[in-house]
Amino acid sequence: MRSIFNLFLVLMLLAFVGCNKHKTIPDRELAAIFHDAVVVNAYLSNETIRNDSLNIYEPIFEKYGYTTDDVRYTISSFLRRKSANLSDVVDEMIRLVEEEYDALELAVTKLDTIDNVARREARRTILLDTAVVVRTVRDSVKMFYEIPFEGAGHYTISTEYTLDTLDKSRGRRFSVRKMLGDSTTKQLYASMMHHYRPSKSTANIDISEKDAADIIALQINLNDFRHASARDRALYPKPKVTKMDIHSVKVEFTPTTEECVKELYDRELGIRILSDTMFFGKELLASGEGDDDDDDEGVGDDAGDEAEKDDSAEKADAITE
């Protein structure tokens, strides 16, 4: 609203300058000019450009076939005509702005809906492990997962577990790390694990196209002491054997929105430049015939030719008689 006020302030101040006889702009066209000017003001406010001159609106005036002097004259005429009401023009301008906003909002909603459907359809589970029991040192390998990297997108990594009441260690962590091409790893997520009750930890990780170029695998560790903080290592220097039930470990992957939409269109549209119907027709395809029936088609053609010859011979005999 501040940009609209500034616009009208500039127009009213300049309306008193150069009020020679010029064209009077109809109310509806003036409202359209105001609408375009408000849009320009909104853009300029984001770009921090000064908009205290009518010169920036001259292309808008020219679009409707008017000059700056025509706009000045039309606005000044509102002050002289009792039957004219500038508020009506403003109301029409606001209506145009709201109408355009509603149309854009609807378009964005449709696009968001398509994006959401595409992401939901493209989401897939790349790891699911359940009913893992850890009681001995040998079982510790069950708490570590290394999964192939699926590329850029969103990863939801969750685990449901219960640390047994006999488990006396502290500082246990659920962590997710990325393995790079040089075999080094970097932490993406970590959280402390809770004792004595069923618990759940979830990591939501977004990986961009740029970062994906260096990643070769993701590592999940449900008993991560290797990368514990100095404080944890000081408090728990000798972690005891883990006693834990892992109810589930699940990794879901959703590609980037662009890739999801592309996959959705490719699957739903199924457009091919050269389709079978172009060559054989719908009826022929429906009957199950096609390229394999070339010999049968040849026989049919020969029979048709013979029938045509017989008809021609009969007609010739009739003419001769």
Image (spheres, grey):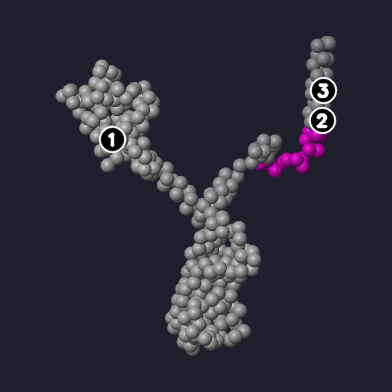
- 273 and 158: which is toward the camera: 158
Q: Which residues are magenta?
A: 285-300
Of circles 1 and 2, which is in front? 1
- Could you say which quadrant of the image residue 308 lies in? top right
Three-letter amino acid code of the residue under disc 3: Lys
Q: Is residue 30 above or below residue 170?
A: above
Sooner in the amino-acid sequence: mark 3 or mark 1: 1
Between the residue at mark 3 and the residue at mark 1, the CA separation in whole angstroms equals 88 Å
Quadrant assignment for the C terminus: top right
- Residue 213 is labelled as none
Q: Which residue is mark 3?
A: 309
Q: Name which residue lies at 80% across and 19% down.
A: 312
Residue 290 in the magenta stretch? The answer is yes
Sooner in the amino-acid sequence: mark 1 or mark 2: 1
Q: Main secondary structure of the magenta part?
A: helix
Sooner in the amino-acid sequence: mark 2 or mark 3: 2
Q: Which residue is mark 2?
A: 302
Q: Position of residue 35 (x, y in %)?
A: 32, 34
> How would you rate the neighbour count of disc 2 (Cα within 10 Å): few for under 14, some for 14-19, many for 20 or more?
few
Q: Are marks 2 and 3 in contact (CB under 8 Å)?
A: no
Quadrant assignment for the N terminus: top left
Q: Is residue 205 above or below residue 268?
A: below
Q: Which residue is mark 1?
A: 7
Q: Name which residue lies at 52% across and 52% down.
A: 257
> How would you rate the neighbour count of disc 3 (Cα within 10 Å): few for under 14, some for 14-19, many for 20 or more?
few
